[in-house]
Amino acid sequence: MAVRIDTRYTERFVTKEQVSAMQPRIASAHEQLHSGTGLGNDFIGWLNLPTDYDKEEFARIKQAAAKIRSDSDVLVVIGIGGSYLGARAAIEYLKSPNYNLATNGGPQIFFSGCNISSDALNELFMLCEGKRVSVNMISKSGTTTEPAIAFRAFKKYMEERYGKDGARERIYCTTDRAKGTLKALATTEGYETFVVPDNVGGRFSVLTAVGLLPIAAAGVDIDKLMEGARLAQNELCDTDIEKNPCYKYAAVRNALYEAGFSTELLVSYEPAFQMMNEWWKQLYGESEGKDTKGIFPASAIFSTDLHSLGQYIQDGARILFETVCVFDQPKQQRVIEDDPANVDGLNFLTGMTMDEVNKKAFAGTVLAHVDGGVPNIALNIDTWSESDLGYLIYFFEKACAISGYVLGVNPFNQPGVEAYKKNMFALLGKPGYESQKAELEARLAE
Ligand code: PA5
């Protein structure tokens, strides 16, 4: 299996018996998920997506990506939450966090509409200056405020630069198959559209057009990405937690949660994993954090954050456990050079690879954190390939769904994210929210 789990550093905190006691709950969660009888069962399209996807659309995604690569220096991807995190995570993971500085002939890819910052939007227009631009607007609902504001600005910009006909050739919309404002707008304007399937929620949508178009535009082989996810779909079905690392992960994290460890830190020793952390945080936070329950998802990149969060992790409130994503090898090795003068006293490292040092940092940190009271799960990942990333994405999605059912929540809704939007709309004077406006303003004035 492309992802393997090592839970030996949790055994001091939850016994083998406590983990085994999860087995029936995992089996029941599996049954609910696979029979489609669990909560939120109208949003489980991601479960069979690696085999059951629209092949005609998949071919169109590859064509559109090839066109973008041939006629654009910049692709602006507009979306928020599940409509951008997966694509950004995959591009940084497979290419580099510095992909835009060395695109190897592909377009630079900038993400917009994931905040309401005028500085960020204005800077992006500056970055587009003198470059050939395409836009991929992604919104399932079509009404999300952040991307809608950015798209309003980019639509105007594209029409001014290229004319209405030219803009039409360069704007791609990924949205609902039939309904919503974005779908209606795309139909009126004649933009090429791609579909967010009805039964796939935003945070589970990276292997649909939502993620695949920007990822393919970055030059990634999306066939291989799907191939890895397919492998995971086939392999991660055994209900026996000792044979299925995905279900073992769900079992151990729930056992830790019930033993009082309420915050999970997803950790990697590779900066290219940073946006995967962000994608994972949305996936788990939005899926599990409800009904006053759920593990709080946090993240860190080590050893970087050992110099900022390390003190807290070692010595702070004992609510943390870590899940460390460990790669067998880096993408490229680098050997530490000799310094005949040994001015820094580091000649004991001469000839070692940086990865050997990184792995020793990991080993030393695990022991220290476990001694400090922080359980550690390791997820061992074979390679940085497209296929292994596809596997890892599916692994996390399935473990999340199973975990949610074990926790007793609906892992596929997100009622809580509406609260801030209602207040914001009322304060902005959106029609229909008049009655709340006065009350909110009075509270703010208190
Ligand atoms: O997971 C989710 O459903 C959310 O994070 C959405 O992806 C996010 O709010 C964006 O929604 P939309 O694609 O409708 O603009």
Image: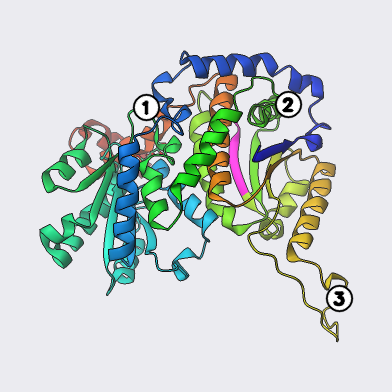
Separation of disc 2 and disc 1 at Cα?
A: 34 Å
Helix, strand or loop at mark 2: loop
Q: In which quarter of the image is the N terminus?
A: top right
Left or right of 414? Residue 438 is: left
Q: Is residue 182 visible?
A: yes
Q: Which quadrant of the view contains residue 306? A: bottom right
Mark 3 highlights which residue?
A: 347
Where residue 33 sits: x, y (%)?
51, 19
Name the kind of residue labelled 1 in the image: Asn
Mark 1 highlights which residue?
A: 199
Mark closest to the chain's N terminus, 2 or 3: 2
Residue 238 in the image: above or below residue 93: above
Is the CB of the residue bearing disc 3 within 8 angstroms of ligand 1?
Answer: no
Separation of disc 2 and disc 3 at Cα?
A: 45 Å
Mark 2 highlights which residue?
A: 259
Q: Which quadrant of the view contains residue 156? A: bottom left
Left or right of 292? Residue 326 is: right
**Disc number lying in front (2 or 1):** 1
Q: Give the range drawn in magenta.
A: 295-299
